[in-house]
Image (cartoon, grey):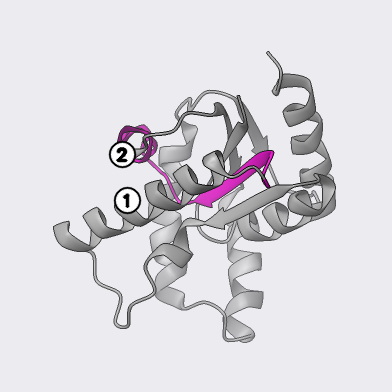
Amino acid sequence: MKPLIFLNGPMGVGKSTVATILQQKFDRCAYLDGDWCYQVHPFRVTEESKALILHNIAHLLDGYLRSPDVDLILFSWVMNKREIRDAVLSRMTERGKCLFVTLTASEETLRERFQKDIAAGLRTPEGFERALSYLPDYQADFGGLKLITDGRSPEECAETIWNYIVSHRED
């Protein structure tokens, strides 16, 4: 069964950066960022948009699981409630060996990262407020590996996650 790695955490914690590094550490590795599955301006959260996002994610993950060219799938997205992850899985028709990784950080670390991203035009102050509001949700146990990214480089985080995947992919 192919490993399907769910990389979870608040906005700005480093999911996309770490996933990009991780993808290069594995041969035949697909990477899907959930944010790519609904690029509409202006972004609005409605029941219809949520259904479309979940449909798109499930469809793409199913495709990667079926593909003979892919041996491992990385999926990163903000899933601050276990129900979000379960909603993705319930819409999928294919099954992989699911491994769960949650990245989190202190408010101070998130603030520093957001300030750099805001200055670079990559994020908005409103995004920071939303990320902060989700931070308490990541105190819950999502199963798998929980990695606090404070004081760690993206490369260090990727190495820790790589070791976790390698040691659990055949369980």
Q: Amino acid at mark 1?
A: Leu
The residue lying at 39 percent from left, 61 percent from top is 130
Is the residue 150 above or below the residue 101 in the image?
below
- Residue 118 lies in quadrant: bottom right
Residue 43 is situated, as x and y percent measured from the top left of the image, at 30, 75
Instruction: Describe residue 15's horizontal placement relative to residue 125 as left or right.
Output: right
| Quadrant location of the C terminus in the rendered image | top right
Residue 91, placed above or below residue 131: above
In the image as oriented, which residue stretches furthest toward the top? 171
Q: Which residue is mark 1?
A: 54
Q: Position of residue 152 (x, y in %)?
A: 80, 49
The label shown at residue 91 is 2
Contact (Cβ within 8 Å) of mark 2 with mark 1: yes
- Image height of 148 relative to 38, above or below: above
Q: Residues within 10 Å of mark 1 (few under 14, many from 20)?
A: many
Q: Earlier in the sequence, mark 2 or mark 1?
A: 1
Q: Residue furthest front?
A: 68
**Residue range (magenta):** 69-91
